[in-house]
Amino acid sequence: MSASVGAEKIILRLPDGLREQIKNAAKQNHRSMNADVVFHLERIYQARAELEEPAHRPKLLRLFSRGPQS
């Protein structure tokens, strides 16, 4: 059974060049574009939820202080 069965679908308007960036990142990560976008969105929302938990703040501050990873 496909993981997409029952999954919500949305249409996005992307700024110029972003689709190509997603495509390249997905290729580097050996994922489909969809899987790569979902992976990153899940990480963002998980981090946001953890920011509300005081016990996780030091770990997240270290993670975010590293800056963008290439």
Image: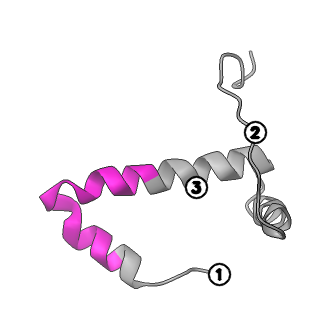
Q: How is the image coloured?
A: one colour
- State which region is magenta: 45-62
Q: Is residue 49 magenta?
A: yes
Tell me which residue sits at (48%, 54%) in the image.
43
Tell me which residue sits at (18%, 54%) in the image.
53
- Whether pointer 1 and pointer 2 mark residues with C-beta atoms closer than 8 Å, the reply is no
Tell me which residue sits at (39%, 76%) in the image.
64
**Would residue 1 appear left or right of 68 to someone viewing this image?**
right
List x then y, in percent, for residue 13: 77, 52
Helix, strand or loop status at disc 1 = loop
- Residue 53's place in the image compared with 38, above or below, is below
| Mark 2 or mark 3: whose residue is earlier in sequence | 2
- Whether pointer 3 and pointer 1 mark residues with C-beta atoms closer than 8 Å, the reply is no
Q: Which mark is residue 40?
A: 3
- Residue 8's place in the image compared with 41, above or below, is above
Query: How many residues crowd around disc 3 within 10 Å: few (fewer than 14), some, or many (20 or more)?
Result: few
Q: Which mark is residue 70?
A: 1
List x then y, in percent, for residue 21: 79, 68
Query: How many residues crowd around disc 1 within 10 Å: few (fewer than 14), some, or many (20 or more)?
Result: few
**Would residue 33 appear left or right of 36 to someone viewing this image?**
right
- Amino acid type, residue under disc 3 in the picture: His
Select label 1 or label 2 by which is in front.
2
Q: Which residue is mark 2?
A: 11
**Would residue 48 appear left or right of 34 to someone viewing this image?**
left
| Mark 3 or mark 1: whose residue is earlier in sequence | 3
Q: CA distance from mark 3 to mark 1?
A: 14 Å
